[in-house]
Amino acid sequence: MPTPVPNDLPPFHPSRASLGQPHAGAHVGNALAGGTVAPRPFAATVAELRRRVHGAVVTPEETDEYDQARAAWNLSVQQRPAVIVVATEAADVAETVRFARSAGYRVAIQATGHGIARPADGAVLIVTSRMDAVSIDPEARTATVQAGAKWGAVLAPAQEHGLAPLLGSTTDVGAVGYVLGGGMGWLARHYGLGSDSVRSFELVTPDGIEVHCDALEQRELFWALKGGGAGSLGVVTSMEIDLYPVSTVYAGNLLYPIEMAVEVTRRWRDWVAGMCDELTSSVVVMNFPPLDIVPEPLRGRSFVIVRGCWSGDLEAGKTLVDEWRTWRAPVLDMFGPMPFAMSDAISQDPVDPMPAMVTTESIDELSDELIGIIVQSAVAAPGNQPPLAFVEIRHAGGAVRARSAAAANDRVRDAEFVLELVGVVMDAHHGLALEAHLRHTRRKLAPHVTGAAYLNFTEGTEKQERSASAFRPEHFARVQAVKAALDVENRFCHGVAITA
């Protein structure tokens, strides 16, 4: 009998292409409950999978290829999948999901390896990094983006036509994964989150069936995927997104002495009150490491930074930023006209993998007391090393809030500010100290924050435990209904935790 489904979702039937292995639903259930994970596939089963897919099928015995394919961007994450499929096309993904279903394995998905919620231990890991095709339609102002493409591959050709996607703070992140988590970038207050730009998805369901979804077809599934379904509702193999007329912006950074961190943060809070939507900005307490890759004037030093991107009239943007220059000359002024193609220069995020810990909070009001707690969390005590790499407060509101009512992850979008705290794990001992510091900081923040988590700023256990906080209860129930219709066994349990 077909599984009941909400609204317009059709019933999804059992797999239409089995690999001929006995179904192992019982031990999948144990695996999902945290018990015994499924054993590695038998050699004959893997051989059959290899015959059915065009991409690479990698097992733990192939040490070098296996270690490369399973690697996460966050080097703190170690995972041991039962088998890895490096897909080259949507058909590979569908065959792999059918294999996992018939053989009784959980399914995890990875493109660039950012934002892993649960390591793929004992699961079938689908790596989409080779599915990286991008096509731009300048007349329609759209881009079609495959699952493994990074934002750089979208931004560069779009900018040739004076257009831009709603990417994040770095072009080195996978576009699809970013959008599925919402996607808050330097155009967010002007145009919304990355998920707001999606016109359609191509998806492989947990039954291994390829479906198209948009605002008219499979609309409930489409709604849930836009900010609510990263890694949990199937495998998105491509998406079509809107592009926006952005070519040159007034953007960059103003660096002030770290001793002014509280003063600058308070002034920034007052400055952004009632700010035009064309400006998306943040204030950052940044502790630059003493490494050769850091420019000499910044190396090993700490600053408080006002950064942002104005996507309106350039002279109007300069006038706004001049208010800071008139107030107090920065130590380093890196704000000015900039081709949006160079937007990486705003945040200057690292591109090399590193071991890190990250946490987040949403904030309605930045009180003086809260600002003191945030600054204290990142500024080193005399004679000590800084406890965090950086703490950033991003200004939301604008189009982020204006479009929240219709979005799945509506609760987190209603906040005025989003806080991110990031630390780099130097070694195991430091990792324990860093974890304790973040936990202690979150306890101090608790009376001042909404409790909603922007899930793209979470990883690991925290992403799983705080998944529900991004949604209002009624929206979370809708997402759960979609999940229940598509994935009764919770085979896709390595992404956002939305199972009832």
Image (cartoon, grey):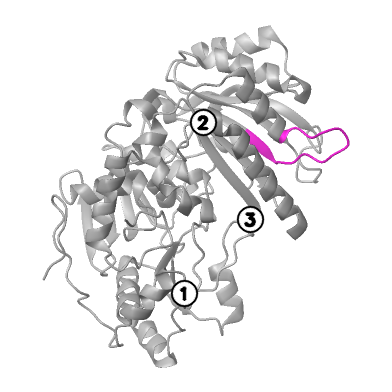
Q: Nearer the viewer, mark 3 or mark 2?
A: 2
Q: CA distance from mark 1 to mark 2?
A: 35 Å
- Whether residue 421 is in magenta: the answer is no
Which mark is drawn over residue 35?
1
Secondary structure, magenta segment, majority class: loop
Q: Relative to the observer, which residue lies in front, 452 or 160? A: 452
Q: Residue at x 30, y 80 (%)?
A: 102
Residue 210, x across and y down, in percent: 24, 64
Distance, label 3 to label 1, CA atoms, is: 31 Å
Q: Nearer the viewer, residue 72 or 341?
A: 72
Q: Looking at the image, is mark 3 or mark 1 earlier in the sequence?
A: 1
| The residue stretch that appears in magenta | 378-391
Residue identifier under label 3: 353
Q: What residue appears at the point 30 percent right and 87 percent down from the top-left corner?
A: 22
Of residues 438 and 94, the one nearer the viewer is: 438
Q: How far apart in space, not on screen, are marks 3 and 2 (Cα)?
A: 30 Å
Label drawn at residue 449:
2
Instruction: Reply yes or no: does residue 387 show up in magenta.
Output: yes
Of labels 3 and 2, earlier in sequence is: 3
Q: Looking at the image, do the residues carrying marks 3 and 1 touch, with CB atoms under 8 Å apart?
A: no
Question: Measured from the top left, where is residue 382 in percent x and y?
Answer: 86, 32
Whether residue 345 can be seen here: no
Amino acid tagged 1: Gly
> How many C-alpha atoms fall within 10 Å of the one at disc 1: few (<14), some, or many (≥20)?
few
In the visual, does 197 lie left or right of 256? left
